[in-house]
Image (spheres, grey):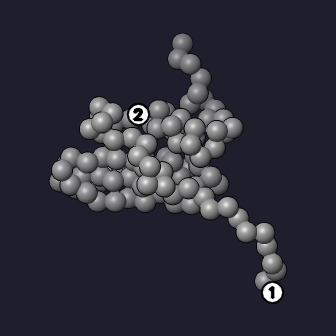
């Protein structure tokens, strides 16, 4: 039996667009897996979008968070998780990913 529930606010959707010609699918899939593991309760999905022309772009709800051409290469995973956290869960701690290097 279904019980009425309070409508849940829609969770953000992350998309990773990658260049198929550059063979960046594995990098995109790895980043998606890392984001899904870290933000399993804070995001609705992480989608992989095949593209071309050297594209590698990460967006949250269609707002560009990282663009390889604009931002100069690929984010490292620590940096990406911090950028996503700042948008979807500002109060979330990232544990060892946030500690300063010695």
Give the tally of numbered discs.
Answer: 2
Q: Earlier in the sequence, mark 2 or mark 1?
A: 1
Indicate left or right for 51 with 45 as reference.
left
Indicate left or right for 52 with 96 as reference.
left
Q: Secondary structure at mark 1?
A: loop
- Residue farthest to the bottom? 1
Q: Position of residue 93 (x, y in %)?
A: 66, 35
Vertical comparison of 90 with 30: above or below: above
Q: Position of residue 78 (x, y in %)?
A: 49, 33
Q: Secondary structure at mark 2?
A: loop
Q: Position of residue 50 (x, y in %)?
A: 29, 59
Give the residue number, with chain letter if any, for mark 2.
76
- Crowd rating for badge 2 (residues with CA inside 10 Å; few <14, some 14–19, many 20+): few
Classify residue 9 by image quadrant.
bottom right
Which residue lies at the image location 29% right of the left edge and 31% below the top edge? 72
Q: Nearer the viewer, residue 45 or 29?
A: 45
């Amino acid at each position: 039996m279904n019980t009425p529930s309070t409508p849940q606010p829609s969770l953000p959707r992350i998309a990773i667009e990658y260049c198929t010609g550059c063979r960046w699918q594995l990098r995109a899939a790895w980043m998606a897996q890392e984001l899904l593991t870290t933000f399993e309760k804070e995001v609705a999905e992480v989608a992989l979008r095949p593209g071309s022309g050297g594209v590698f772009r990460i967006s949250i709800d269609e707002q560009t968070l990282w663009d390889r051409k604009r931002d100069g290469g690929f984010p490292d995973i620590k940096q990406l998780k911090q950028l996503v956290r700042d948008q979807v869960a500002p109060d979330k701690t990232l544990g060892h990913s946030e500690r300063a290097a010695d």
